[in-house]
Image (cartoon, rainbow, N blue to C red):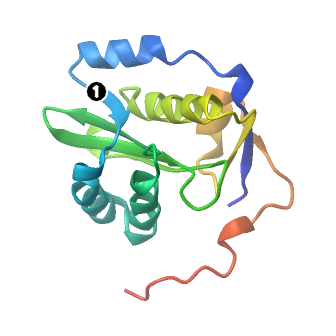
Amino acid sequence: MADMLVRLYDLPEVSPMLEKLLAEGIEIRPAIAPEKFYVVDWVRSTFGSVWAGECDVAISNKPSSCIVAISNKTLLGFACHEATYRNFFGPIGVCEDARKRGIGKALLLASLHAMHEQGYAYAIIGGAGPNEFYQKIVDAILIPGSDPGIYKGMLKSSR
């Protein structure tokens, strides 16, 4: 899967989405250290160990670069940036029961806005997929020659 490039200085507003979700009882915010093992375990069981590894690193960043979606003390989704490489976004995931509610879009935008606040003008979405999601929401473009990109030769579990 190829990488994609996003202009961070031209992002859609995220505040209206966050307010709408909050009115529905869904909070979007950075994960904090005491939640680390709960969040990482949830990501591992829901999406696998590769994403759990990236999530672990993102939560350990100062400030945390793992954004979570929570409702009634239940984790619904997450998005990370600055996990595998600086200026890289990903991974992102929303549990199947919570999809099609705008949570993924809000997580993506909250994370990308945080990257812009860190001083980045552009972000790279590593190994992006589905591309249409990123193209539609943030006008991301494919980076030619970026497949397999940073994940080339990565160790993987045989389990």
Work out whether 60 lies above or below 113: below
- Residue 129: x percent and y percent? 60, 51
Amino acid residing under circle 1 = Glu
Is residue 116 or residue 99 the one in the foreground? 116
User: If the image is split into quadrants, where does the N terminus sit?
Assistant: bottom right
Is residue 142 or residue 56 the one in the foreground? 56
In what element is the residue under mark 1? strand
Point 70% across, 29% down: residue? 8
Is residue 47 or residue 80 the one in the foreground? 80
Query: Total number of numbered labels?
Result: 1
Point 65% across, 70% down: residue? 151
Q: Quadrant of residue 107?
A: top left
In this rendering, position of residue 23 left or right of residue 141: left
User: If the image is split into quadrants, where does the C terminus sit?
Assistant: bottom left
Point 58% across, 34% down: residue? 112
Work out whether 101 lies above or below 36: above
Q: Residues within 10 Å of mark 1 (few under 14, many from 20)?
A: many
Residue located farthest toward the right when viewing the structure as drawn: 144
Residue for badge 1:
27
Q: Quadrant of residue 94?
A: top left
In this rendering, position of residue 84 left or right of residue 53: right
Q: Quadrant of residue 122?
A: top right
- Residue 49: x percent and y percent? 39, 71
